[in-house]
Image (cartoon, rainbow, N blue to C red):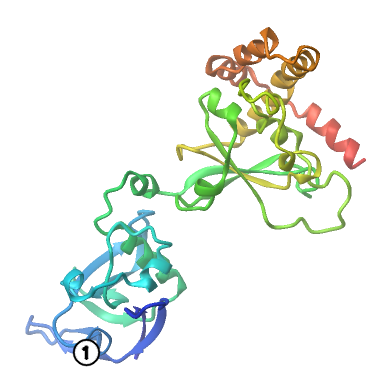
Amino acid sequence: MRRVIFFPAHTGAKPEFRWLNVHTMLMDKGDGSTYQTPDVQSLLGDGSPQTIRFDENLILGAKLNLGINVCFDDNFLDSYSSANTAILTATNRKAGHEWRGPVVAYCGKRVDPGDFSKIEDMDMASVTDVAAFLIDYYNKTMVHKLRKGPKVPGVKAFCFGEPSKERAKAVLVPRMHPVFEVGEVSAISKNVGMPLLLSKDAVKITGPYVTGTYCNPALTFMMVGCDSNQRSDFGWAPLKWMGGEVPNTLIVRLDRQPLNIDQVVAFGDYCYQVLRPVFEIACEKFGETGKHGSAAQRVMDTMTPEKWNAYLAAWDGSDKWWEEQRAEKFP
């Protein structure tokens, strides 16, 4: 018997592992070679189900060690009246096709492009690969096109309390990572043509908590509001991005383009060292006059793709201001 993944058709179902008998069959080559096939009819019913074969994760484009076959009723749209809730769960409702009826997936080592010489057990990693197939099947949406491809180079920025002496590290982020749906946009980054999404790390830092542990002034100033029409927000970051509310944070580009450590660290320096002073002047003027005038315009004139690219090109990588502020929190 071998372990397969089963997506039952009944309402409220979830994906589950099942054990199926495996049959060894003679191939038509006349040389005594064999192939194996599981008893999918015991789950799908009588008849000849449609079988689709794939050998890579169809979203990541990564080659699989074992081939996977997915079996289902080829006439499922007419044979069944409601969507398969187990598949809705497995794909987080991202499938481009309305799957109905039961579905079985199994894996093995291929003896030729179609048959398996040996059926193997499915595991939790296989669930991810099957879910990628179910999402990809006849999915022509633009959202899905953005999901497909290799992992996205991103950056994890560290707060003051992180034991690492580095300000950030490079990470590879799956294209379907929640950061692309729930991450918060840095308005400044959009203005300078490098749209960034930020998502706080839910994992707490080990060791005793002290004031300043969850601080990162560079990230705070990345999240400063820059719409002068929003009178109370201009020049200020949301409270949840201030003070002790900024833990380690995952940062990616909104457009899923590669992002590297130098870009993130330099952008933090740009926001803190270049934009912060002109924002402060604009906020002082607003406090005096109640209006955003030329001081606010000066901020916007400093916050352009050309100014940012010039800063990045000349950036020397100095961490002096960062180390000074960190030393104040952790002498």
Of residues 167 and 144, which is closer to you in this image? 144
Expressed as whole percent of the image width and height from the top left, the position of residue 173 reads 51, 50
Residue lying at the far right in this picture: please name it. 331
Q: How many marks?
A: 1
Q: Is residue 118 left or right of residue 217?
A: left
206 versus 28 height, above or below: above
Expressed as whole percent of the image width and height from the top left, the position of residue 103 reads 29, 76
Residue at figure coordinates x 78%, y 46% from the top left: 214
Q: Is residue 254 left or right of residue 129?
A: right
Q: Is residue 53 left or right of residue 206?
A: left
207 versus 261 height, above or below: below
Of residues 90 and 53, which is closer to you in this image? 90
What SS does tag 1 mark? strand
Residue lying at the far front in this picture: please name it. 290
Of residues 266 and 227, which is closer to you in this image? 227
Q: Which residue, given by chain and number where applicable, does mark 1 sit on?
A: 24
Of residues 322 and 216, which is closer to you in this image? 216
Expressed as whole percent of the image width and height from the top left, the position of residue 13 reads 40, 78
Q: How would you rate the neighbour count of disc 1 (Cα within 10 Å): few for under 14, some for 14-19, many for 20 or more?
A: some
Residue at figure coordinates x 42%, y 80% from the top left: 16
User: Which quadrant would the N terminus be assigned to in this image?
Assistant: bottom left
User: Which quadrant would the C terminus be assigned to in this image?
Assistant: top right
Classify residue 325 by image quadrant.
Answer: top right
* Amino acid under disc 1: Thr
Expressed as whole percent of the image width and height from the top left, the position of residue 293 reads 67, 10
68 versus 201 height, above or below: below
